[in-house]
Image (cartoon, helix red, strand yellow):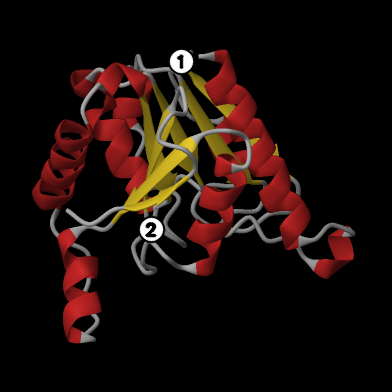
Amino acid sequence: MDFLIDGQNSAARTVVLAHGAGAPMDAPWMTDVAQGLAGHGLRVVRFEFPYMAQRRDTGKRRGPDRPPVLLETWRAVIEELGAPGELIIGGKSMGGRIATMVADTAGVAGLLCFSYPFHPAGRPEKTRTAHLATLETPSLILQGTRDSLGNADDVAGYDLSPAINLHWLEDGDHDLKPRKASGRTHAQNLAEAVDAAAAFVAGI
């Protein structure tokens, strides 16, 4: 398994981030978040699912692996890193979603999900929330208020576990990017998300 690591190996906590469905672990968004968290004294580890690693090798785009492969990859990453009780796992969109499906059984310290895909774009009736009602791992979901895969109005109607905390980024889309008319910038929303994530990790 190839990892990208930011921060010091001596850090008390390690945050493990998986990428979303369409962009690799070294995409600018992932790099900004990883380096931001490292700036808060955290060790941040990034990895890629097999389909994305294959794309890197061949240059050919293909869709994400099937869920069993994604789940097994997360389990393998946690096993390779070791000390699950000191890990906070999560990531962007799909990567964070798959992390929520292994967290309880893996015994990790926490979950950190950026832009959780509560439903497919344009299909709010097809929710991906059933397992979130019983989630026991302390969790933080950082979500844009106008995310097309789960905006503030959508999420208000879901049955979510009390272990899940939500932090809303004003006017943010699925990349947490606000519109110019909002008066906010993408950099501001990312910085706010990173600060909230670091505070959450510090409190676990």
Relative height, residue 172 to residue 82 (above, below): below
Which numbered disc, 2 or 1, marks the residue that appears first in the sequence? 2
Which disc, if any, is residue 20? 2
115 or 106: nearer the viewer: 106
Measured along the vertical axis of the image, is residue 72 above or below residue 131? Answer: below
SS for tag 2?
Answer: loop
Seen at 24% across and 68% down, the residue is 52
Q: Determine if residue 127 is in view.
A: no
Looking at the image, is 55 positioned above or below residue 16? below
Look at the numbered discs 2 and 1 and tell me whether their residues touch, using CB distance below 8 Å.
no
- Number of residues whose C-alpha sits closer than 10 Å to that of mark 2, classed few (under 14), some (14–19) or many (20 or more): many
Helix or strand or loop: what does disc 1 sit on? loop
In the image, taking residue 24 as reference, residue 172 lies left or right, namely right
Percent across and percent down for residue 105 are: 19, 20
Identity, as a three-letter code, of the amino acid under mark 1: Ala
- Residue 15 located left or right of residue 185: left
Residue found 18% across the figure and 79% down from its top: 57
Residue at 15% x, 32% y is 79
Give coordinates of residue 143: x percent, y percent. 59, 43
Q: In front here: 80 or 142?
A: 80
Q: Amino acid at mark 2?
A: Gly
Q: Is residue 7 left or right of residue 187?
A: left
Q: Which mark is residue 163?
A: 1
- Residue 169: x and y in percent read 70, 44
Q: Quadrant of residue 81?
A: top left
Residue 42 pos. (x, y %)? 52, 34
User: Dot 1: few (<14), some (14–19), or many (≥20) neighbours within 10 Å?
Assistant: some
Q: Residue at x 62, y 35 (%)?
A: 40
Front: mark 2 or 1: 2
